[in-house]
Image: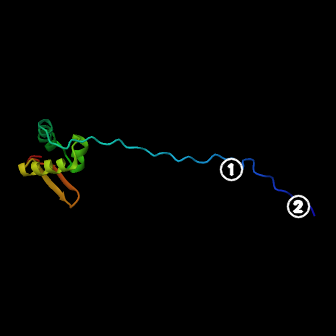
C-alpha cells in the first residue's frame, strides 16, 4: 500500500516573517504651568466666568495650567461669586457661570 503524501505548505513555519510589535503611540508630555503668574490669573478672572461648563479638566485643557492650580482657581472664582456649583463629587466638581434673573 502506497501512502499519499500531502503537499508541504509553500511557506514553511520558520520561513514566514515574524510579526514585529509596534512601539505604540507616544503622547507628548504636557508642559503646564505650575505657578500662577499675573497674565494667567487675569485670563482666568476674565475668561472662565464666561464658560458654560467649568471643571478642573476644562481649565487644565484650555488654560494649560496644572490640576492644583485649576482647583485653586475654581475655589477662588466660587468665593468671589463669579461661578456657581452644579455637582459636588469627591473627584470631579462641576460649575457653571452665574446667570442673571433675566436669562
- Asked whether disc 2 touches disc 1, contact meaning CB atoms under 8 Å apart, the reply is no
Residue that appears at 93% across and 64% down: 1
Q: Nearer the viewer, residue 95 or 26?
A: 26
Residue 52 pos. (x, y %): 19, 46
Task: Find numbered disc 1 in the image and state the secondary structure of the residue it sits on.
Answer: loop
Q: Is residue 16 left or right of residue 2?
A: left
Residue that appears at 11% across and 37% down: 38
Residue 39 pos. (x, y %): 13, 35
Q: Nearer the viewer, residue 87 or 7?
A: 7
Quadrant in the picture for residue 37: top left
Residue under label 2, please give it. 3
**Which residue is at the far left?**
80
- Above-or-below relation of 63 to 96: above
- Between the C-alphas of marks 2 and 1, the distance is 26 Å
Residue 26 pos. (x, y %): 40, 43
Task: Find numbered disc 2 in the image and state the secondary structure of the residue it sits on.
Answer: loop
- Foreground mark, 2 or 1, reads 1
**Which residue is at the far top?**
39
Residue under label 1, please give it. 14
Q: Is residue 98 left or right of residue 21?
A: left
Q: Nearer the viewer, residue 30 or 87?
A: 30
Quadrant in the picture for residue 92: bottom left
Q: Residues within 10 Å of mark 2 (few under 14, many from 20)?
A: few
Residue 9 pos. (x, y %): 75, 51
Q: Is residue 78 left or right of residue 53?
A: left
Looking at marks 2 and 1 on the same chain, the residue that comes earlier in the sequence is marked by: 2
Amino acid at each position: 500500500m502506497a501512502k499519499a503524501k500531502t503537499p508541504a505548505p509553500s511557506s514553511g513555519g520558520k520561513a514566514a516573517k515574524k510579526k514585529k510589535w509596534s512601539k505604540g503611540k507616544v503622547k507628548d508630555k504636557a508642559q503646564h504651568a505650575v505657578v500662577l503668574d499675573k497674565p494667567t490669573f487675569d485670563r482666568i478672572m476674565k475668561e472662565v466666568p464666561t464658560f458654560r461648563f467649568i471643571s478642573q479638566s476644562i481649565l487644565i485643557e484650555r488654560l494649560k495650567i496644572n490640576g492644583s492650580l485649576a482647583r485653586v482657581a475654581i475655589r477662588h472664582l466660587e468665593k468671589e461669586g463669579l461661578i456657581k456649583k452644579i455637582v459636588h463629587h469627591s473627584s470631579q466638581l462641576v460649575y457653571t457661570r452665574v446667570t442673571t434673573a433675566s436669562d
